[in-house]
Structures are given as C-alpha cells and as structure tokens.
Image (cartoon, rainbow, N blue to C red):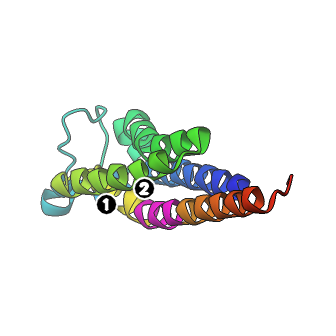
Amino acid sequence: MVRAIRVVWIVASVAAAAYAMYCGFIQVGEVTLGCSKGGELSVYDARPGATCEDSVFTALGPRRPVVLGLLLMTPPLIAAWALRIWVSWLVVPAMAVLIFVGIARWADFWLLLSFGALPLLVVSIVVALAHLVVRAHTDSRRARDEATGSLH
C-alpha cells in the first residue's frame, strides 16, 4: 500500500511536468495583461519581435515553463522519495503557497502557477490522508501481531 502512495506522488509530479510543458505552448497573449489590454506584448524579458500570438516558449523562452514545472514537481517528488507522513503533509502548505503566489502575480504568466497548484493541493490532501490511514493500519496490525505473538 505504501508503494501506491509513492506511485501517486510520482504521477502527480509527472502531471505537473506535463502541465508546465502545455503552458509553454499557450499563446503569450492569453497569459499577459499587456496583450489583453493594449494588444501589444509588454513583458520586460520578451524576445525582440515577439507578438501576443507567439507561444510562451517563442516569446519568453523556456525559462518560465521550466521554473513553473520545477516549482510544481519538486514537492511531490520529495514526498515520493522520503515517503514519510510529515513530508506528505508538507506538500499541502507548499501547494497552498504556490496558489497564493500565482494569485499575487495574476497579471502575467505566473497566474498559471495557481491553476497547476490547485489540483495538486487537492491530490496532496487526499494522498497525505491516505498515507496517515495506511500508517495507522500498519501500526494496528503490528500491535495486534505482537499481542498475539504472531511472527508475521
């Protein structure tokens, strides 16, 4: 059962990577306020000649989607590697912070951080609760076996 918890954390991390890749192909005009208000790309690190119709990769380069992916992937990967209940529970506030950061940066690309972290927050709560249940079940079985003298 503990193996299933690790698998779910890894799947969550892979889903975060896929989401970050997807965000790289979104038109930059969909994620910047300058394009929606004035129709022109006014991002400080945009490539020369980039327009609002270009993808994030084309207009801004790969750095933002890569950082987005790393921010979303790292907490579940650490939880999968550590496989400790307290680490699983640390993923919950980590995702909540990422949601807050995305909302605080609502006018540009980083709003996508909130959209990626919200489903991961829900998954992390479910997985952390499941981890707690599995641990309680394992501890009760171990206590029962010790009480009956079983060598399981």
Main SS of the magenta part reads helix
Counting other residues with Cα less than 10 Å from the Cα at mark 1, is it few (<14), some (14-19), or many (20 or more)?
some
Give me the C-alpha separation between circle 2 and circle 1.
Answer: 7 Å
Mark 2 touches mark 1? (CB < 8 Å): yes
SS at circle 2: loop
Residue 79 placement (x, y as % from top left): 53, 45
Q: In this view, does 17 lie to the left or right of 47?
A: right
Which residue range is magenta in the image? 120-129
Residue type of the residue flagged with mark 2: Ile
Query: Residue 84 is drawn in which quadrant?
Result: top right
- The numbered dot on residue 26 is 2
Q: Looking at the picture, does residue 77 appear above or below residue 27?
A: above
| Residue in the picture at 31% in, 51% down | 98
Q: Nearer the viewer, residue 50 or 45?
A: 45
Image coordinates for residue 44, horizontal then vertical, percent: 18, 35
> Quarter of the image containing the N terminus?
bottom right
> Label 1 sits on what residue type?
Glu
Task: Report whether residue 52 is seen.
Answer: no
Which residue is labeled 1 in the image? 30
Which element is circle 1 on?
helix
Q: Which residue is at the front of the view, 60 or 96?
A: 96
Residue situated in front as seen by the camera: 5 or 142: 142
User: Looking at the rendering, in which quadrant would you find the C terminus?
Assistant: bottom right
Res. 112 in view = yes
- In the rendered structure, does residue 127 fall within the stretch colored magenta? yes
